[in-house]
Each structure stands twice: as structure tokens, then as C-alpha cells.
Amino acid sequence: MKGETDAVTRSAGPLPGDQGAPSSVSPFPVHPSRSYDVDLLRTTEFPWTADTIYLNNASIGPLPERTRLVLDEFNRGRAAPHKLPDRELFAMLADTRRRIAQLVGASAEEIALTVNTGFGISMAARALPLAPGDIVLVSDKEFPANVYPWLRLKDRGVAMELVPTTAEGWPDEARLLERLRDPRVRVLAVSLVQFSNGYLVDLGRLSAATRETGAFLVVDAIQGIGQLPLDLSRTRVDVLACGAQKWLLSPWGAGFVYVHRDLIGALDPAITGWLSFEGTDDLTRLTQYDDTLRADARRFELMTLPYQDFAGFNASLELLLSIGIEQIRDHIATLHQPVLAWAERSGARVVSPRGASGSGILCVAPEGVQAVHRRLKAARIVCSLREGAIRFSPHCYNTVAEMERVAQALASD
Ligand SMILES: Cc1ncc(COP(=O)(O)O)c(C=O)c1O
């Protein structure tokens, strides 16, 4: 991360009160200044990497073995539900909130568990105090999950304004800052990392600008969290939504929304679940109907949640935190090198930004891009074709040797 978020060092390891943690001994102890053992990670957690080069985490992150085992174990209990008492399920969800908070520099009270990214963005669109005539700024070319919930606010007289991208197709931050000066602009909604080119916004800069104008900053973080460090205690964001199915290597159905502590009480959730209310703490007296919303972010949760997915999410969070997100970021940057060297040699266009605006997503647009993509597929290299470019999204378990094979396959026409 850039600017304010540069100096993040999150300590991993067991959390206080972590009795529900799926496994307590990690083979990947935290070594803040050293890299981790990628070969060990591959054989223990991603054994299928022996025959496939998977570079598609921006689409679907694989489940580590420990997560798959936790899911199997959970489902065994689910087949005989007396083995899954409510108290253990709720404790497991509390662990998940704590681990997410550790990951993003928040407190657990600011985390609500959700089933995907879209839920958090829609919640923000409906709950933020917006009035007719207000404007929501969104960069053109954003992923649609961060567009449609804002577009639909026209039913309230709130307009979404798409701000054109730069010539390279990246969010035009200077233009966004300029438009923020319009007092009608009440929300800036951005992806932390763009899905089609990997552009990483300067969150510190956008945050400072929204603080100045009083606009709300809403972040779709699904393409960033898990591959890039983020410290929300240092960079003010109002609402941040994230699904866990990509870089967080977790089951579909797991995700979260962060709501800044100052906003929780002020936001009236448009839709609520029965566990959003304080009165439902006591499951033996549910029909007293006390409609006091919870004071923490659980007021935004929709119960019943897919518990098995959060049990899996917990296990994946444990793994990622034990490796260290800074280590993962640095590792991925190394992985990009062989493909960048090929692009330099061949003159292929690199669609992704380099340097401070770069991320773990690397997109290239060689001549005959569709044929090249087919060639990669035939070589058992899994990646995506997005917006006219080949998108590589390697993660913690990929190797430089794999990326050298990718560069060879790119070169062999
Ligand atoms: C930027 C971005 N936001 C959101 C999503 C997905 O949203 P959801 O988790 O709601 O399915 C994706 C990819 O699928 C994405 O790339």
C-alpha cells in the first residue's frame, strides 16, 4: 500500500480467546523479515499445484487443504447437528470477526459477516444518509458490483456519476479529487484494486480528500485484501466490503463489511436479520421483540449465515495471517518478473500499472490475445481474459519457476 498505509506490520499468530481456532500449530511461523517456505506451502496446502499452474486468484482462490479439512469436519457435524451447539457456532463467528479485524487493522466490533462483496456495497448504498440531488462518484470501468447498487439510487433522486478513466484505462484519481470539490458529491465509491488491470488506488490520498469534503468513502476491497496489507486504523474508510472467495482463499458464501465505528450507530440498516437485535441474545426468550439494534456492526448482519463457509474462512485467515500479508505481497511482486521481462523483450503492452499503483494482478495484451490465451490454457496455465487482456493473478503458493514457464508459453507462437 502507498501513503499512510505503507508502514503496516500486522502481527499474526493466535488471538486472545481463540479456543475455536481450527488448528493451533501453523507450519508457517511468522518471520517478518524473511520469506516463507513456498515448497512446503505447496505440498501441504495446495498439492494439486504439482500439475497445474493456477494464476487465477482474481477469479477464484483455491481452498487450502486445512480449509477443505475444516469444511469436511464441519459437514460431518452438520449431518448430526447435536454436534454443533449454538454456542460453538457463535464463538466461531466471533473468531472470524476477530481475525478479519486483525487482518485489516480494525476492531471486531466494526466487522459484520456477509455472504459476498455486493451485500456490503448495497448495504452502504441504502443506509448512508443520502438525499435527492446528492451525487455518488464512481470511476468508469469499475466491476459492476460497485456500480449497480449506486445506479439504483436514482429511485431516491441520487445520481451516480461515472468519472472517465485515464488514457491507460485506470481510475483518474486527479479527476476524482477535482470532482470531490463539488458539494453535491456525498460518496466516493472505489475498488481498492481494479479487477481488469490491477490498478491500486492511493487510498491514503482519497481518504484525506473525502475527510476534507465530508464525503463518505466506500471501498470494494475484494481484489486487494489477502494480497496487499491494509491498515484501517491509519487510513480512514467509512465502509469497506469484501468477499472472501478470491485472494482470501475461502469458500463462496463468506465475506465481510467493515463499518467505521463512528458510523455504526448512525446507519440504519435497510434490511435486518433477527440476530441484528440485542433482544435475541437469549435464545430461550426470543418473542419479547426488543427492537434495539445492536450497537456494533452485527446490526448489519443477515442471519442465518452459512456457518460452514465461515468455519472455512477462519482456517484460511489463519493460514494467511501466519504467512504474513507483507510477505505475500513481496512474493507476488517477484513472481511478476519473468512475464514483465517477456513483455519487454516482445514489446507486448503491459496493461497494469507498475510501481506504487501496481498490485498482484498483472495484465498483458499481446497481439492476438485470444489465441495466446488459448495457448496458455493448452499448456495447463490457468488465467483469465478480461477487457482485452490476459490477467495473471498469482498468489502465495506460486513459484518463479512456474512464471518462467508462463513466459516461455507466451513466447512460443
Ligand atoms: C472488484 C470486484 N468486486 C466484486 C466482485 C464480486 O462481488 P461478489 O462478492 O458480490 O460476488 C468481483 C469479482 O467477482 C470484483 O472483481
Image (spheres, rainbow, N blue to C red):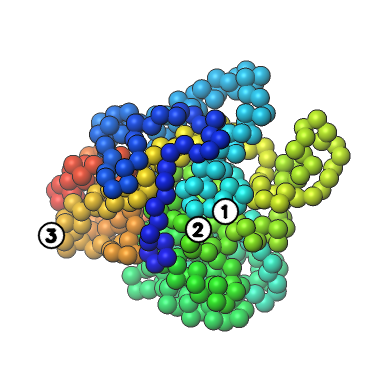
Of mark 3 and mark 2, the one earlier in the sequence is 2
Q: Which residue is mark 2?
A: 232
Q: Which residue is mark 3?
A: 345
* Residue in the image at 82% along x and 36% along y: 286
Query: Based on the displayed image, in which of its 4 quarters is residue 50 positioned?
Result: top left
Contact (Cβ within 8 Å) of mark 2 with mark 1: yes
- Residue type (three-letter) at the residue carrying disc 3: Arg
Q: Which residue is mark 1?
A: 258
Closer mark to the observer between disc 3 and disc 1: 1
Q: Position of residue 10 (x, y in %)?
A: 42, 49
Residue 282 located left or right of residue 402: right
The quadrant of the rendering that contains the N terminus is: bottom left
Q: Position of residue 182 (x, y in %)?
A: 57, 82
- Secondary-structure class at tag 3: helix
Residue 207 located left or right of residue 78: left
- Residue type (three-letter) at the residue carrying disc 2: Leu
- Secondary-structure class at tag 2: loop
* Residue in the image at 29% along x and 29% along y: 43
Of mark 3 and mark 1, the one earlier in the sequence is 1
Return the residue found at the far front.
16
Closer mark to the observer between disc 3 and disc 2: 2
